[in-house]
Amino acid sequence: MTKQGKRQYAIVGVGGVGGYFGGRLAQAGLDVKFLLHSDYEHVREHGLTVKSHVGDFALPKIEAYRDVREMGVADVVIVCMKTTRERLLGELLPPLIGDDTIVILIQNGIGVEADVAEMLPGVRLVAGLAFICSTKTGPGEIWHQFFGNINFAPYNIDAKEVEPIVEDFALANVQTRIMGYEEARWKKALWNIPFNGLSVVLGMQTDGLTRGEAAKICRAIMDEVKEASHALGVADETGKWLIGDEECDKMMAMTQKMPAYSPSMRVDYDNGREMEIEYLYRRPVKMAQEAGVRMWKTEMLTMELEAIEERMKENG
């Protein structure tokens, strides 16, 4: 911690999500360092600008770095990189990690914590499940359209260790809560699996995916995610399933309230970038299959995404 007793935060991946949450923490006066790549020079000179539906703000000066080795050890490292670059964490994280450092992975998919724990034995991990519509629109520019809360799910540490981080996010006017790891990951998958992939395959934003036949397909895939979570034992201490029809209904209703929005996979596709197929699709499909459940519609969606990505690579 700094001499003032504030936790030191390091943001790895300053896109729509990392830029927004890191910006909010810095705006609240917390000690935040940002690791940047392509827009380092711009942000170093001009800072970070956030256009938000809850109020715009600008940070003319932030602690910007392009070399992780210059940042020093942090109390909390928040990773917001796409999982397509997960292999880089083996090099990026060690200079930031001390004995008590907590690493929060605000990343999409199932299985990311297990892989990072294998990559970096002893690392203290928390899953961060962000419910937010936020996009990077230019160098140092973030557009926050809707929502903006985050759930923290401890992976291999005690929940009490996360409580001070929750307090910091409250100071930054970000709504948070602590919940169980499997519940948090699979509830986020309930939205990610249908809406990310179908936005690419059907060429629709979220408003189109919540109407007509597209909405029926979304709900059918949600039902597969629900059944997979049951097969994998995602339940409370009494044995009650934590993901049921009510959660599916709430997720659809929540999405209907959103403005027209392109999920992250659609943004990656539109920009010719590799899509997050591994952790969003292949891993949950494999885990469900090993537990005795076939996610037939999700498997078909996975193959369609793989074919689209193969065509993208062939076309350069």
Image (tube, rainbow, N blue to C red):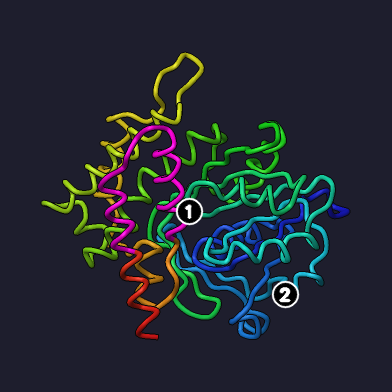
Q: Position of residue 223 (x, y in %)?
A: 27, 37
Secondary structure under tag 1 reads helix
Tell me the tag on residue 219.
Answer: none
Three-letter amino acid code at the position of disc 2: Tyr
Q: Magenta includes 278?
A: yes
Q: CA distance from mark 2 to mark 1?
A: 28 Å
Above or below: residue 219 compared with residue 271: above
Q: Main secondary structure of the magenta part?
A: helix
Secondary structure under tag 2 reads strand
Q: Outermost residue toward the top? A: 238
Q: Position of residue 245 (x, y in %)?
A: 27, 30
Residue 204 in which image quadrant: bottom left
Q: Outermost residue toward the right? A: 3
Q: Outermost residue toward the left? A: 212
Q: Marks 2 and 1: which is nearer the front?
A: 1
Q: Which residue is mark 2?
A: 65
Three-letter amino acid code at the position of disc 1: Tyr
- Residue shown at 37%/82% (left/top)? 314
- Residue shown at 31%/70% (left/top)? 308
Q: Which residue is mark 1?
A: 279
Say whether disc 2 or disc 1 marks the residue closer to the N-terminus. 2
**Residue 236 horizontal side relative to residue 227, left or right:** right
Q: Where is the C terminus found, in terms of image quarters?
A: bottom left
- Residue shown at 40%/58% (left/top)? 133
- Residue shown at 40%/38% (left/top)? 288
**Residue 170 horizontal side relative to residue 191, left or right:** right
Q: Position of residue 176 (x, y in %)?
A: 54, 41
**Residue 32 horizontal side relative to residue 271, left or right:** right
Which stretch did the figure color magenta? 277-305
